[in-house]
Amino acid sequence: MKIVADENMPYVEALFGELGEITLVNGRQLRPEQLVDVDVLLVRSVTKVNKQLLAKANKLKFVGSATIGTDHIDLDYLQVSNIPFSNAPGCNATAVGEFAFIAMLELAKRFKQPLKGKVVGIVGAGNTGSALEHCLKAYGMKVLLCDPVLAKQGDKVNASREFVPLDTIIDQADIISLHVPITRTGEDKTWYLFDEAKLNQLKPNTWLLNCCRGEVIDNRALIKVKQQRSDLKLVLDVWEGEPNPMPELVPLVEFATPHIAGYSLEGKARGTHMLFQKLCAILNLEVDKSVSNLLPAFNISQLNINSDLSETQLLNISRLVYNLSDDDYLFRNSFLNNHGFDHMRKNHTHRREFSALSLVNTGLSEVNWIYKLGFSGVER
């Protein structure tokens, strides 16, 4: 069996190595002739899988994308061609939720404002939006959810959740975090969901985070509005025109990263493993490898906590798992380099999730919330 996989997809060799011959490729530059006689294609969001790419794929039995979204996949063409497909919904949801939560803690520290007490509006209540909601509610914060699609179709995550219109989010939320797929047509399209008019409607001192797709915000309009409104604070992990962000936008952003909000080692391992499980099912093979076996040990075995945690202390603990400022610094100094954006993504191998760090309560009475955030540990 011949397997072609994106070179930036981790754990491919460990999971798929026994199933066939693996060729690693640059997913953004993949060409049709590279798929001749190939049985399995494993991609990420940078590869457009369509009729043109698969023109010479004469033996393809499976296409897998280690992503939540499928906007880079021509699903209709795969179906007509009888090529099984699987993505990895939810694989990096925890990572994205924790990324947004940590970013909010960082903003609170930078601007000397307590995070707790602010109202957070989450636009898009699917896997990643729900993961952020989980963090925020564990921390005791008020959350408003906007998801017109789920409101109409029914909420599969939690049938008891209530949704509000986007205008309510804009009117009431101190912080807005975006977690929607990109859709270009229809009543609920998300392409340029935040255009110049919507951006101008934001409350004074709003914090706006985008961890989904760059084009959910009109970046040209964002530049214009931000130049007029220094009160707005931005965290952008995704950019219109990736991998070439608009250079004039970057200095206007508080924290800037190269589309790596979901790039935890745990999330990457889950994504690749989900594709492995699907291929094993197609081939009627036993799944003999687990995610836990793929992950390296965390560099801190455990941390004792023996005093009430301030917000600053919570941030410092979170930084042990992931320091957002490191990626922000690297981004600002590298994104204009040749292939700088993709190089940062390829080499992003240090990020972990809260669960990697074990916190041991040595006597506090009320710390259940920190375990609900996702940290591992026990009470003594």
Image: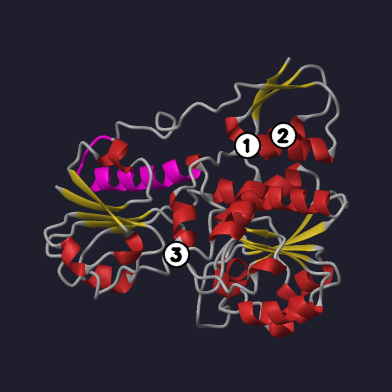
Mark 1 and mark 2: span between their CA atoms? 7 Å
Question: In this rendering, is residue 99 above or below 318?
Answer: below
Counting from the top left corner in percent of width and height, residue 290 is at 38, 32
Q: Mark 1 touching mark 3, by CB under 8 A?
A: no
Horizontal arrangement in the rendering, residue 219 relative to residue 260 (left or right): right
Most extreme residue toward the bottom, as rendered? 197
Counting from the top left corner in percent of width and height, residue 167 is at 76, 76
Which of the 4 image quadrants contains residue 71? bottom left
Q: Mark 1 touching mark 2, by CB under 8 A?
A: yes
Residue drawn at 72 percent across, 60 percent down: 254
In the rendered image, which residue does mark 3 sit on?
338
Query: How many other residues sit within 10 Å of disc 1, few (<14), some (14-19) or many (≥20)?
Result: many
Counting from the top left corner in percent of width and height, residue 29 is at 31, 65
Counting from the top left corner in percent of width and height, residue 90 is at 50, 51
Of badges 1 and 3, nearer the viewer stands 3
Where are the magenta residues, as a range? Answer: 267-286
Residue drawn at 82 percent across, 48 percent down: 109
The reply to whether residue 131 is visible in this rendering is no
Which of the 4 image quadrants contains residue 319? top right
Question: In this rendering, is residue 119 above or below 321?
Answer: below
Task: Label 1: state its secondary structure.
Answer: helix
In the rendered image, which residue does mark 1 sit on?
321
Amino acid type of the residue that numbered disc 3 sits on in the rendered structure: Asn
Question: In this rendering, is residue 20 above or below 294?
Answer: below
In the rendered image, which residue does mark 2 sit on?
317
Most extreme residue toward the top, as rendered? 380
